[in-house]
Amino acid sequence: MSENFNEEEALVKEYDSKLMRRLLKFAKPFSMYILLVIFLMLITTCFDLTRPYLIKNAIDNNINGYKRPYTLFEKPQANSIKIGNKYLAEGSVSGGMPASIVYYDKGYYVIQGKNIDNKPFSIVNGIYTQQNTTSNAYKLSINELKIIRKDDAAGIIRTAVYILILSCLTFILNYIQIYILQYTGQKIIYEIRQKLFNHIESLSLSFFDKNPVGRLVTRVTNDTETLNDMYTGVLVNLFKDVFLLSGILIVMFLLNVKLALIVLCSLPLVIAAAVIFKKYDRDAYRQVRTKLAKINSSLSENISGIKTVQIYNKENKKFREFDNINKSYFKASMSQLTVFAVFRPAIDLISTLTLSCLLWFGGLKVFEGTLSIGVLFAFISYLMQFFQPIFDLTEKYDILQSSMAASERIFMLMDNNETIVNNPKVQVNKRFKGEIEFKHVWFAYIPGEWVLKDVSFKIAPGEKAAFVGATGAGKTSIISLLGRLYDIQKGEILIDGINIKDIDKYVLRSNLSTVLQDVFLFTGDIKSNVRLNNKNISDEDIIKACKYVNADSFIEKLPYKYDSHVNERGSTFSQGERQLIAFARAIAFNPPILVLDEATANIDTETESLIQNALEKITKGRTTLVVAHRLSTIKNSDKIIVLHKGRIREIGSHNELIEKRGLYYDLYQLQYKEN
């Protein structure tokens, strides 16, 4: 079983279109929320693309705005300012001399003529020299510079305000987007978990006989949570990555085709790195999942059997076994981390190489005057955004792998059809009379290995019937079949003359109360464990039932009496006390058919004498089936059915069977001598 479990945990799916279609069906009811999130992502992506463009404009039009053309006049002009003995106006205006503003030696100067940006120049003693050209240079004071560049300063402030507004809007939209996305993801997982748990509840006991509880808990918790990561972290965010990459490429080509082609040249390297990463990460991931499954299996087994481990003083041995498993998991995890440790720096290296090429090529173009500094800055900003989705690839790839594996395990469970088919064909009264008949019943847990062979008997309403026989004779199987916890392969089981397969199984089970040898109590209080969510059972009914079976003798001594807390499985109560609560539970439901499966096995002699008296009262007027190894507890049964190797060997009362001196007589003599 554990080997199958480990193999199942090791399933690694990169992508499966059939699984994805089934997963998307769960998202379909929330499609409007998902579309809204995608729309918000489109808007925020536009905002992200706008910020570098605004900064680019601020650099070219405002910060470097002094490089625009100016005109000098001898006399004042409209919108001109006085510089020395001349007047300076912005732009190329007829009737004046062309002029420029240059930055030299920590100061700004006004020169006559045009400055060539990519050629060196000098200013000495108020004389500007570039190549063979000289002209007068006037150094601007701080006040004059502020007056000249007041529009540039206003432009920079305006850009800063725009960026602040965009950032605030992005924050608000991201909050709304993340909230809606997480809400949608949680609702989808809620629906999947509900459907999965509902399906598990509908499965027959034969399924649970073959599957450990730990595996089922993992399906409902860990695997469904893994799917949440896919819905919220991969599917919808893929749209954002596509929007971002597409938008960046479009803006890059609009700004400068040559620089955009340089960025595109890095894509083959990125794709090659991703393909190599995909191969090695898949293998490493498979190893991690397999080793993790072994750790889970080891923990489940050792913690469940901790009592046996401690009794036989095997702590050190079990620790060494776990240590070896834990070390193998550590090595597998480190192998996967090594793959990450290579891939991420590799993408960083490609990003840095691309950035270097941009700076080299773009910087030369800036010197030549064919490219503005703002455009180069925008490309560098977009390049950082361009590689961000690629950086996320590793995390999303792992989430996708986990989700495909988790979804396959979940759907394997959902597709399991080991259910007791409920197809009621006959409408029956909610309360049965209690006549039970088995007609030539054959049953096997494993095909071909018959547990019951041609079993036939009839129990009249209100009759008390006991089943006895050696271990493995099929006694408990008969009890399980009566409530359709399993379905028979051949024959018929009738209640009140109706085949139980034609009765609604929920109506059928509501007419049965079963008390098992191993009583299961749920976390809560005593009242909730007796009531089991049946609102028709009042507190008075609970107290009455507990008094009826003498359970009040220990409940009244508890600090909170019937409201006293019950730990998982009722660990704070003795086996006898748990059994008494189970009796009270059965009596509170007041069924027409009562089933006692070794119900008094764990009760001491004093308590048993009290219960026997209660049983005599509660079995009156209802059909009672008793399974017991202690034959002294069933002497007063109306009918005793003796089973041996799946077949009925004897039927009769205690005295009749003793007189026959058959199998029952031998069993009784054996127990009598032992006692």
Image (spheres, rainbow, N blue to C red):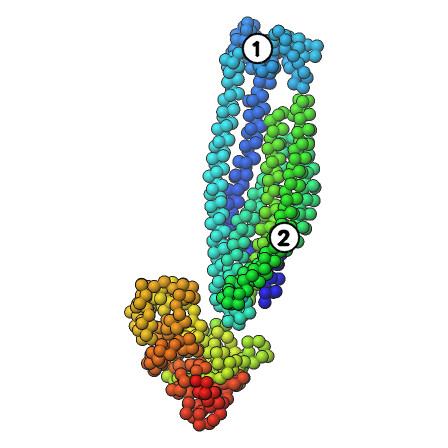
Mark 2 residue type: Lys
Where does residue 585 sit, x and y in percent of width and height? 37, 72
Q: Which mark is residue 331?
A: 2
Q: Secondary structure at mark 1?
A: strand
Please report contact status of discs 2 and 1: CB closer than 8 Å, yes or no: no
Where does residue 30 sit, x and y in percent of width and height? 49, 52
> Total label count?
2
Where does residue 242 sit, x and y in percent of width and height? 59, 43
Query: How would you rate the neighbour count of disc 1 (Cα within 10 Å): few for under 14, some for 14-19, many for 20 or more?
Result: many
Residue bearing the label numbered 1: 139
Mark 1 residue type: Lys
Residue displayed at 36% across by 62% down? 565
Question: Depth check: 152 or 278 in front?
Answer: 278
Residue displayed at 35% across by 78% down? 606
Q: Which mark is residue 248?
A: none
- The vertical placement of 660 against 64, above or below, is below
In which quadrant is the N terminus drawn?
bottom right
Residue displayed at 58% across by 15% down? 106
Mark 2 vs 1, N-terminal side: 1
Q: Secondary structure at mark 2?
A: helix
Question: Depth check: 559 or 400 in front?
Answer: 559
